[in-house]
Image: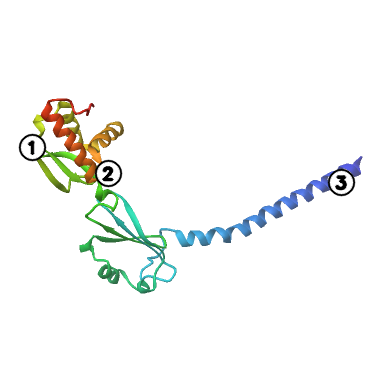
Amino acid sequence: MFKRLLYAFAGLLMMLGVAITVYLGLNLLGEPSIKPGLAVFDSGDQSILPVKSDTFVQEEREYLCGDIHIVFLGRAPRELLGLDREDLARRYPSAEGWSMEEQGRMLILRQQVKDFCPEHKNYRHLGVHEGYLAVFEGPLGYDEKLLRIEKNMPVATLHPDLQLKLHKAGDFNRQDPETQAILRAELEFPSEQAVNAMLENLDEATESGTNPGLDF
């Protein structure tokens, strides 16, 4: 009986020793695989400028509509190697809308473009300018580019439902998502041809005194 207890106790000691050995081994092996990653991507790293061969560069353009197009993403090209902040500022001047930002080993070069992206540049939307129905370039919420004023369509002569929509469209970004979706469906168009077709129908409906079908 005593021998059995002794063997059992010895077995427990062996199992405990193996467990401790495995635990220590994992800790020792695990540390090196974690620390280099933290060292590379820690935002508190020393500045990555001047540009080095292991610097990643992201060059992007941000348009009026909020869309961002990435022009380049990868390791720093040869022509940027060795450039410091002053050199980069000359190559990417702030006067042309450029800014730079460091994120870990990533250098982000961003240009604010005072135009719509290639897709939204074709968009048109209806709005109000000086009391008349007007056509603007781009999607709703951006009235920076007035294309034309429909002098034959004073807003006061339009159907009350359409007047209400136009009023809400003038404050588009403060509308709730459901209202924005309705306004986009009725006042925003993917092309010049589409908005022209709508205006022709609206003109005919206004002359005949009928509701143009824009029920809110």
Q: Nearer the viewer, residue 128 or 157?
A: 157
| Image marks 3 and 2: residues in contact by CB distance under 8 Å | no
Mark 2 or 1 closer to N-term? 1
Q: Is residue 75 above or below residue 14?
A: below
* In front: label 1 or label 3: 1
Task: Locate the C terminus by quadrant.
Answer: top left
According to the picture, the residue beneath numbered tag 3 turns out to be: 7
Q: Residue at x 29, y 72 (%)?
A: 87
Judge the density around disc 1: few (<14), some (14-19), many (≥20) Cα neighbours within 10 Å.
few
- Does the rendering let one see residue 53? yes
Q: Is residue 91 left or right of residue 40?
A: left
The secondary structure type at the circle numbered 1 is strand
The secondary structure type at the circle numbered 3 is helix
Give me the C-alpha separation between circle 3 and circle 2.
84 Å
- Three-letter amino acid code at the position of disc 3: Tyr
- Does the rendering let one see residue 170? no
Residue 21 image point, x, y percent: 71, 55
Q: Which mark is residue 190?
A: 2
Q: Nearer the viewer, residue 61 or 183?
A: 183
Q: Nearer the viewer, residue 157 or 41?
A: 157
Mark 3 or 2 closer to N-term? 3
- Three-letter amino acid code at the position of disc 2: Pro
Residue 202 image point, x, y percent: 17, 33
